[in-house]
Amino acid sequence: CSSNGPHASTLRLVRDSFKHPMWMLPWIPRAQSQRSGDTKIVHFATRGLVCKKADTEEDRLTVQFESRADGLRTLVNVQVHEIAPSALLGGLAVGDRVTASRDLVSGTGLLVREGMRGVVLGPYSDARLIVRFDERVDGQTHAINVLPCEIRRQ
C-alpha cells in the first residue's frame, strides 16, 4: 500500500495506533482462505474490531466481525483497503444512504443531479468520501469522491 491516494488515511490510522478499533468492511476479502467457492464470508458494512496486524502478511489486519455470512465466528484477515473507520467525515458511516445536496460536476460535465440517491463506500481522503450513486446523468456506474457538504443523509 502507498502512503498516498484514496486509502492513505486508513493506512495512517492503522500504522499510528489501534485507539479507534471499530472498523467496517466495504469490500469482501478475495483471498482463498476467506472464501468458499463464490460464497461471501462477510457482508458489506459489517462492523468489526481490528484485533492486530496479521501474522502472515504485513499489509493485512486480523478482524473479528460482529457476524459472518457463513455463520462462523473465526477471525478474518483483510487488506487495509478493504476496511474503513466506522465513523467517517460528517458523522457518516460506510453503508449510509445519502442524497446529493446539489448538482455535482466534474470540469464542465454534470455527473449527478441534486437529490439523486447513493451509498457511502468509505473514505477517499482526509477531506472526501467515496459515494456510489444509484444513477448518474453521465451514464457512468463507478463511484465518485465528494465533500461531506455535497451530500446529506437520507
Image: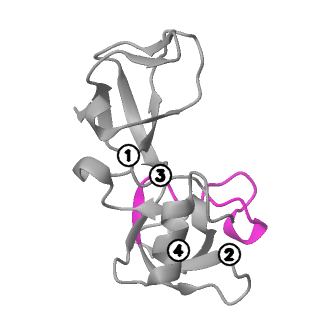
**Quarter of the image that includes the N terminus:** bottom right
**Disc 3 to disc 1, how far (Cα)?**
17 Å
Q: Mark 4 belongs to which amino acid?
A: Leu
Q: CA distance from mark 3 to mark 4?
A: 33 Å
Mark 3 sits on what residue? 125
Q: Nearer the viewer, residue 24 or 126?
A: 126
Region rendered in magenta: 29-48
- The Cα–Cα distance between marks 1 and 2, rounded to whole angstroms, is 24 Å
Q: Is residue 18 left or right of residue 62?
A: left
Which residue in the protein does label 1 denote?
95
- State the mark number for residue 59: 2
Residue 83 visible (yes or no): no
Q: Is residue 57 above or below residue 146?
A: below
* 16 lies left or right of 96: right
Residue at the (38%, 49%) spot, across then down? 127
Q: Hey, what amino acid is under mark 3?
A: Ser
Q: Name the residue type under label 2.
A: Asp
Mark 3 or mark 1, earlier in chain: 1
Residue 130, x across and y down, in percent = 47, 41
Query: In the structure shown, which secondary structural element does the residue marked by tag 1 occupy?
Result: loop
- Counting other residues with Cα less than 10 Å from the Cα at mark 2, is it few (<14), some (14-19), or many (20 or more)? some
Q: What amino acid is labelled 1 in the image?
A: Gly
- For the residues labelled 4 and 1, the Cα–Cα distance comes to 22 Å
38 on left or right of 114: right
Magenta segment includes 150: no
Closer to the camera: disc 3 or disc 1? 3
Distance from disc 2 to disc 4, alpha carbons, whole Å, reads 24 Å
- Where is residue 129? Give x, y as percent: 42, 44
Identity of the residue drawn at 39% across and 29% down: 118
Query: On residue 72, which mark appears?
Result: 4
Please tell me which of labels 2 and 4 falls first in the chain. 2
Instruction: Say which of marks 3 and 4 sits in front.
Output: 3
